[in-house]
Amino acid sequence: MAYKKRSSSAMRRLHRSFGAGAAVFVLFMVLSGLVINHSNGLGLDRQTVSQSFLLDWYGLAKPHRIQSFAVGDDWLSFAGSQLYLNDKHVATLPAGVGAVSNGHLLVAAGRDELLLLDRDGGLVEKLPWNAIGPLPVESIGLHKNSVVSVKADGQIWLTDADFIDWQRVDKAITEPLWSISKPAPADLQQAITRMYRGEGLSVERVLLDLHSGRIFGKIGVLVYDLLALALGFLSISGLVLWLRSRRNGKSR
């Protein structure tokens, strides 16, 4: 009889200890699970992380180089394959070579493609360059009357106002004002760097990794597994204690 009392007392102490330790974990799992279930409605899948320590933890590096081009009163900047209008991400354009404004549209040039954007950065049209010329774009500029010009393998191409008709012209006849990259203001470069690093990391992804323990690597997963086993022990020990108290109540 004394042995059973000691066993029951030890079981209760273990139950209380595990319960206190697991309470915070259970509360976190419940709250994070609720948020994840409604992440689309909350827009967490579209919100990106900007905190440097989290970006460093995930190994998201800074852009190797930021190329910025003045287009009127605005800046079009290339960071890797990402294109930004001022501090707003507007498109993906690999191998950017320059950007100009003809007064109505912004034109960003990559080696294989031109993007036509409105003044707010909205995409108007994509122009694959291989449908116009056989060789990659080297630079983009403006001829007189804001006519957009493109250089490819030393040859100059001029387009009409609608970017439909492209004509190759003699370099000796015309020399456009070519787009040249300039250092953007420091605060703009910092903003672009933060966005560039955060574009691949959504708030939803961080919550999912926290919920599963993967954010802490293999050790985190192992700890979460142990906590899950602790919850299993709480369930079993609680059931055992309930059955014993019920049996003892009947015997009395």
Image: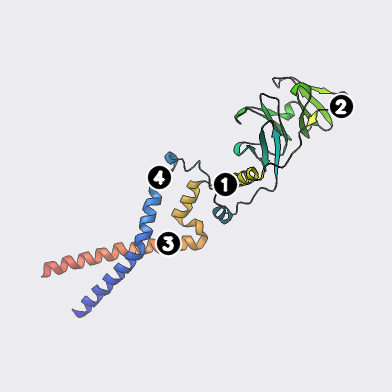
Whole-percent x, y for residue 139 in the image: 77, 34
Q: Nearer the viewer, residue 98 or 29?
A: 98
Q: How many marks?
A: 4
Label 4 to label 2, Cα distance in Å?
61 Å
Q: Nearer the viewer, mark 1 or mark 4?
A: 1
**Helix, strand or loop under label 3:** helix
Label drawn at residue 198: 1
Q: Give the quarter of the image for residue 185.
A: top right
Identified by mark 4, the residue type is Asn
Left or right of 231: which side holds 106? right
Q: Are marks 4 and 3 in contact (CB under 8 Å)?
A: no
Which residue was labeled with disc 3? Answer: 225
Nearest to N terminus: mark 3 or mark 2: 2
Nearest to N terminus: mark 4 or mark 3: 4
Q: Residue at x 79, y 30 (%)?
A: 177
Which residue was labeled with disc 4? Answer: 37
Left or right of 230: which side holds 252? left
Q: Bin the neighbour count of mark 4 within 10 Å (Cα to Cα): few under 14, some 14-19, many 20 and up.
A: few
Q: Nearer the viewer, mark 4 or mark 2?
A: 2
Q: Are marks 1 and 4 in contact (CB under 8 Å)?
A: no
Identified by mark 1, the residue type is Gly
Whether residue 134 can be seen here? no
Whole-percent x, y for residue 235 in the image: 30, 62
Whole-percent x, y for residue 208 in the image: 46, 50
Which residue was labeled with disc 2? Answer: 171
Nearest to N terminus: mark 1 or mark 4: 4
Left or right of 95: which side holds 248? left
Label 4 to label 3, Cα distance in Å?
22 Å
Q: Residue at x 66, y 45 (%)?
A: 186
Q: Give the quarter of the image for residue 26.
A: bottom left
Label 1 to label 2, Cα distance in Å?
43 Å
